[in-house]
Image (spheres, helix red, strand yellow):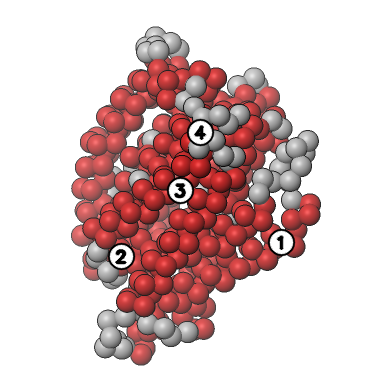
C-alpha cells in the first residue's frame, strides 16, 4: 500500500503544474527523511521481534497476568529517544545542512525534522499487530491511513497549491497515526520502564542498526553519489523515479523475514523453521519471479506514459533494480538474526558498503552514468547474500538446500537474467 500510494502521488506530480525541480524537492524531502531514520528504526524493530516474550529481563519476572507487553512500551521509548536525538542534532546543524551546493539548504528543513520526529515511532504500529497475531488489522490500518494520505497530499496540489502543501498533508496523516499508536499502546503495552530491558534490546539491536545503516543504505548511498556527482535536482529525480525495486517482491520478502524471526525460539524448532522458510520462499518465487519478468517487459513502455516522456531514462534504472529480486528471495539473514548472531549481518553489511561506493564511482567513470550506479548495487547485494549463505554452511553447518529451493531458484534466476540481457540489448523492445 505504501509503495502504491507514493507511486500514485509521483504520477500525479509529474502530470501537475509542478516543475521537475519542484518534484525533485519533494523526492529530496522523502529521501532525507528516510536516510536519517531508516537504519535505527529497522534495527530497533527487528531486534524486538526475537526478544518478544523471549528475553532475560522479563523471563525472570514472569507473566504479569494482564496480557500486556512491557517489551512493546520500552521499544516505543527507544524509538522516541532516537527520534528526539535526530531532531535535536538536525536543528543544531541546520545552518550548514545542504545537499546541492548551488541550490542552498535542504527543502523545508524545519518540516523535515518535525516529520522525522513524528513518523519514526509510528512504524511500531504494524509490529504491535504482528506480535499479537492480528495481521488483518495491519491491512485495515493501511487502508485507512494510506487512503487519507493520498487525499491530503494530492488535494492541495490538484487545487494549484505549491508542493509544501503536500508536505503539510504528510504531516497531518502522521498526526493521525500518532493517535492510533497511543490507542494501541494503551491496549497492548504495559506502561513499565525497564532500563535493563532497554539495555538488552539495544545490545542486540545495535549490530542490526549498524547493519541496516550500511547494507540497507544502498539506495540512499546511490542517491548521495548521484547528487554529489551530477549536482542537479533533475538528474536526482530521474534516478529516484527509477531506483525502485519491484514492490510485490520487496514487500513479500520483507514480510516473510519479519514474520519468521519470532519463530526461532529454541534450537529444537530449527529444523521445522528451516523447512518453513524453504516452503514459503518457494511459494514467493512462483509469485515474484514471473511477475517481475512481466513488469520488466513493459517497463520501457509504461514509464513515459505513467510519468512523462522525459522520465524514459528512469526505466533503465528500474530494470536493474528489478534484478534485486534474485538475492531478495533467499533468507540466510532471517536464520542468522533469529539466532541472535546480529554481528554476522553487520560484517556482511561492511563488505557490501566497502564494495558499493568504489564500484559505483568506477561505473560512472566508465561511462555508464546513473545506470552504472544501479548495477553496482545489484552486484554488491548479491555478494553480501552469498557471504551469509557461506557463513551458515561453514560455521553453522546449515546447507543452502535446507532453506533454499535451489533448483527452482536457479531456474528462475537464469530466466530473469536472460530476459534482462534481451531487453537491455533491445532484442526485446516493447515501447
User: CB atoms at circles 1 and 2 under 8 Å apart?
Assistant: no
Residue at image point 68% right, 66% down:
88
Mark 2 and mark 4: Cα distance apart in space: 33 Å
> Considering only order in the chain, which callout, 4 or 1, is on the residue closer to the N terminus?
4
Mark 3 and mark 1: Cα distance apart in space: 27 Å
Q: Which residue is mark 4?
A: 13
Q: Which residue is mark 1?
A: 91
Tell me the tag on residue 129. Answer: 2
Q: Which residue is mark 3?
A: 152
In depth, the one of 375 and 408 nearer the eye is 375
Mark 1 and mark 2: Cα distance apart in space: 34 Å
Label count reads 4
The spot of residue 302 in percent (x, y) is 40, 21
The spot of residue 141 in percent (x, y) is 32, 57
The spot of residue 329 in percent (x, y) is 34, 42
* Foreground: disc 3 or disc 1: 3
Residue 68 visible in this rendered orientation of the protein: yes
Residue situated furthest top in the rendering: 427
**Picture layout, residue 123 above or below residue 23:** below
Q: Name the image quarter holding residue 264.
A: bottom left
The spot of residue 282 in percent (x, y) is 23, 42
User: CB atoms at circles 3 and 2 under 8 Å apart?
Assistant: no
> Considering only order in the chain, which callout, 3 or 4, is on the residue closer to the N terminus?
4
Residue 330 visible in this rendered orientation of the protein: no
* Foreground: disc 3 or disc 2: 3
Q: Residues within 10 Å of mark 1 (few under 14, many from 20)?
A: some
Mark 1 and mark 4: Cα distance apart in space: 29 Å
Residue at image point 70% right, 36% down:
228
Q: Secondary structure at mark 4?
A: helix
> Considering only order in the chain, which callout, 4 or 2, is on the residue closer to the N terminus?
4
Amino acid at each position: 500500500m505504501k509503495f502504491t500510494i507514493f507511486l500514485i502521488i509521483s504520477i500525479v506530480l509529474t502530470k501537475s503544474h509542478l516543475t521537475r525541480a519542484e518534484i525533485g524537492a519533494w523526492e529530496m524531502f522523502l529521501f532525507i527523511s528516510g536516510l536519517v531514520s531508516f537504519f535505527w528504526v529497522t534495527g530497533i524493530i527487528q531486534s524486538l521481534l526475537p526478544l518478544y516474550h523471549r528475553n532475560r529481563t522479563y523471563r525472570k519476572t514472569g507473566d504479569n497476568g494482564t496480557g500486556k507487553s512491557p517489551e512493546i512500551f520500552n521499544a516505543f521509548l527507544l524509538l522516541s529517544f532516537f527520534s528526539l536525538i535526530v531532531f535535536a542534532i538536525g536543528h543544531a546543524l541546520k545552518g550548514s545542512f545542504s545537499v546541492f551546493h548551488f541550490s542552498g539548504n535542504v527543502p523545508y528543513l524545519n518540516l523535515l525534522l518535525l516529520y522525522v520526529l513524528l513518523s519514526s515511532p509510528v512504524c511500531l504500529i504494524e509490529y504491535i499487530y504482528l506480535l499479537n497475531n492480528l495481521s488483518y488489522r495491519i491491512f485495515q490500518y493501511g487502508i485507512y491511513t494510506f487512503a487519507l494520505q493520498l487525499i491530503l497530499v494530492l488535494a492541495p496540489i490538484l487545487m494549484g497549491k505549491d508542493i509544501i502543501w503536500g508536505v503539510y498533508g504528510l504531516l497531518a496523516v502522521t498526526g493521525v497515526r500518532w493517535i492510533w499508536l497511543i490507542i494501541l499502546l494503551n491496549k497492548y503495552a504495559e506502561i513499565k520502564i525497564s532500563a535493563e530491558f532497554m539495555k538488552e534490546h539495544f545490545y542486540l539491536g545495535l549490530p542490526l542498526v549498524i547493519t541496516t545503516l550500511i547494507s540497507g543504505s544502498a539506495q540512499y548511498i546511490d542517491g548521495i553519489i548521484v547528487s554529489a556527482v551530477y549536482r542537479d535536482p533533475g538528474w536526482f529525480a530521474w534516478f529516484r523515479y527509477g531506483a525502485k525495486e519491484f514492490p510485490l517482491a520487496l514487500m513479500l520478502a520483507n514480510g516473510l523475514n519479519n514474520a519468521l524471526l519470532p519463530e526461532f525460539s529454541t534450537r529444537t524448532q530449527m529444523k521445522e523453521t528451516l523447512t518453513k522458510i524453504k516452503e514459503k520462499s518457494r511459494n514467493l518465487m512462483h509469485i515474484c519471479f514471473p511477475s517481475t519478468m512481466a513488469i520488466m517487459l513493459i517497463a520501457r513502455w509504461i514509464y513515459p506514459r505513467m510519468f512523462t516522456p522525459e522520465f524514459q531514462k528512469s526505466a533503465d534504472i528500474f530494470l536493474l533494480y528489478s534484478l534485486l529480486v534474485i538475492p531478495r528471495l533467499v533468507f540466510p539473514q532471517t536464520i542468522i538474526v533469529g539466532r541472535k548472531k546480529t554481528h554476522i549481518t553487520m560484517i556482511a553489511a561492511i563488505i557490501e558498503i566497502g564494495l558499493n561506493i568504489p564500484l559505483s564511482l568506477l561505473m560512472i567513470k566508465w561511462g555508464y552514468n546513473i545506470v552504472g550506479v544501479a548495477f553496482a548495487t545489484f552486484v554488491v547485494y548479491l555478494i553480501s547474500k552469498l557471504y551469509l549463505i557461506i557463513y551458515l554452511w561453514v560455521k553453522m553447518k546449515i546447507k543452502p538446500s535446507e532453506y533454499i529451493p535451489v533448483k527452482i531458484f536457479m531456474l528462475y534466476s537464469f530466466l530473469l537474467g536472460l530476459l534482462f540481457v534481451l531487453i537491455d540489448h533491445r532484442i526485446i523492445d516493447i515501447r
